[in-house]
Amino acid sequence: DGGPRPFYLSSTPWRAGGNLWDGSPYVRTGVEARFRDRRTGLVWAAVTAHFDHVGSGARRESARIVMERVKAALAEDSEGTKADEAVVGGDFNTFPTAAGRDTYDALALEAEGAGLADVRALPGTTVVDFGASGHTWRGWEGLSRHCRSENVALHGARLGQDASRLDHVFATRGAEVRWTGVVEGAGWAEASDHAPIVVEFGCGSGAEDGAS
């Protein structure tokens, strides 16, 4: 329903070259798109982003930018159009450290202001453990520090499934989330150091109506 709209996680989201705050030299970006359900006519705004891995201030500012885009998508524009629901996902680099928890707290606060919440916290959501608990960050076992096993050993008792969860999905509170879980296969290790979060949304009253 609307082509991809890239934006920058900087002081000038509408163009490159903005201030990156306390972040790394790497320019981080996000993308917004809209999708219309052909059966119900509902319009979904989808936003994805990759936050900086260095600057906690940059991640907090990025959380604000992302959720501001969601609020704008859910508000009626000059042409009288708006999204009915929204979903936000990405690699937010919420490390199991104080700075990482600050990033998640900033995301959750900004999400609340936009009418969204972590899909795990939405009413009626079943959180499924496919074997990875909620740990999306795998790292390279034996080759890098802060891999999943190390994070779980050091932080698991305190943070549970957030001990090695750098990626998250948020959705509007009115969205029907049936289940969510982290899925990975033994042969995926060389493809990425992250494992994907899968979410099934209900799109109607039919028993088989859904979208992931």
Image: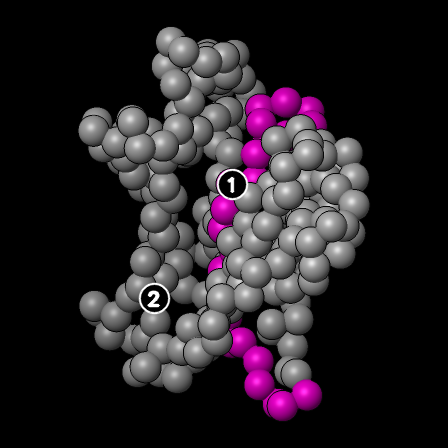
- Which is nearer the eye, 176 or 135? 135
Q: Residue furthest front?
A: 17
Earlier sequence position, callout 2 versus callout 1: 1
- Quadrant housing the N terminus: bottom left
27 sits to left or right of 132 = right
- Give the amino acid at mark 2: Gly
Secondary-structure class at tag 2: strand
- Where in the figure is residue 100, as x and y percent of width and height? 64, 30
Q: Is residue 92 magenta?
A: yes
- Give the amino acid at mark 1: Asp
Q: Which residue is mark 2?
A: 202
- Quadrant housing the C terminus: bottom left
71 sits to left or right of 48 = right
Q: Which residue is mark 1?
A: 91
- Where in the figure is residue 162, as x and y percent of width and height? 50, 30
Please say if the residues under marks 2 and 1 sit with CB atoms less than 8 Å apart: no
Count of labels in the image: 2
Identify whether 140 is placed above or below 11: above
- Which is nearer the eye, 145 or 211? 145
Q: Is residue 36 magenta?
A: no
Range of the magenta residues?
78-100
Q: CA distance from mark 2 to mark 1?
A: 24 Å
Give the residue displayed 68% in from the left and 34% down from the top: 25
